[in-house]
């Protein structure tokens, strides 16, 4: 009788451990967005302080089948934080279901491969039909569908030019809010012909 109880407990314990392992490692990866890495050339710095990758292409798809693709001419990965890449000459596309495609370009950036957050810097240009937003800095979260553009922001929309300190944009809906950092200053609006 004791032998049967011990065998039953051991089998139960093995099943419990197996299920726990499945839920922790496999179920988590099924629910998270997927990412594909396409690397054409890998150069490793001999100083062992960083890694360089040329011509990278990351593609991420979320649960709603929205897609974020980012390419760069060069990336540098700090060995101390391999989830973060410092990028040069960036072109990114955001494909949201039932919405227009957004194109973002910049000279430099910082991309987190774990959560897909991206910082674009220097000569940032955001393009989508009927709109062009320029600035020097953009903080973008693919999972939150939010982009914040700041520093010397100019928003060209139809026949209007808006100059502001900051633009916050819902990427899925294209709703934008335009701000000045100083509440006593107003957004400059100009009309064009």
Image (cartoon, grey):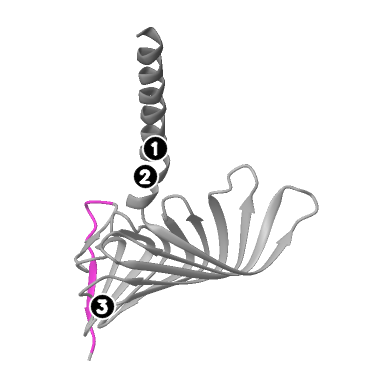
- 138 left or right of 159 in image: right
Which residue is rendered at x = 42% and y = 41% of the image?
A: 25
Toward the viewer: 101 or 25? 25
Name the disc covering residue 24, or none: 1
Does the CB distance between marks 1 and 2 fall below 8 Å? yes
**Residue that sits furthest to the front in the current view:** 1
- Neighbours of disc 3 within 10 Å: few (<14), some (14-19), many (20+): some
Q: Position of residue 124 (x, y in %)?
A: 44, 69
Please determine whether, in this image, residue 180 is positioned above or below residue 48: below
Which residue is rendered at x = 27% and y = 70% of the image?
A: 96
Q: Position of residue 24 (x, y in %)?
A: 39, 37
Q: What stretch of residues is rendered in magenta?
A: 182-192
Asked which quadrant contains residue 60, the reply is bottom left
Which numbered disc, 2 or 3, marks the residue that appears first in the sequence? 2
Q: Secondary structure at mark 1?
A: helix
Name the disc covering residue 100, or none: 3
Q: Secondary structure at mark 3?
A: loop
């Amino acid at each position: 009788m004791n032998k049967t109880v011990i065998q039953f407990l051991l089998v139960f314990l093995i099943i419990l451990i197996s299920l726990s392992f499945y839920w922790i490692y496999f179920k988590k990866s099924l629910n998270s967005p997927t990412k594909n890495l396409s690397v054409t050339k890998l150069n490793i710095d001999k100083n062992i302080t960083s890694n360089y990758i040329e011509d990278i292409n990351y593609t991420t798809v979320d649960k709603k089948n929205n897609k974020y693709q980012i390419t760069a001419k060069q990336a540098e990965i700090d060995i101390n934080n391999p989830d973060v890449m410092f990028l040069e000459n960036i072109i990114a596309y955001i494909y949201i279901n039932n919405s227009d495609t957004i194109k973002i370009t910049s000279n430099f950036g910082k991309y987190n491969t774990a959560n897909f957050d991206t910082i674009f810097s220097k000569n940032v240009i955001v393009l989508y039909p009927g709109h062009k937003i320029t600035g020097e800095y953009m903080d973008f979260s693919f999972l939150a569908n939010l982009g914040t553009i700041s520093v010397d922001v100019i928003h060209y929309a139809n026949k209007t030019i808006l100059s502001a300190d900051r633009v916050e944009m819902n990427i899925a809906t294209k709703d934008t809010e335009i701000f000045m950092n100083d509440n006593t200053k107003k957004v400059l609006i100009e009309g064009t012909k």
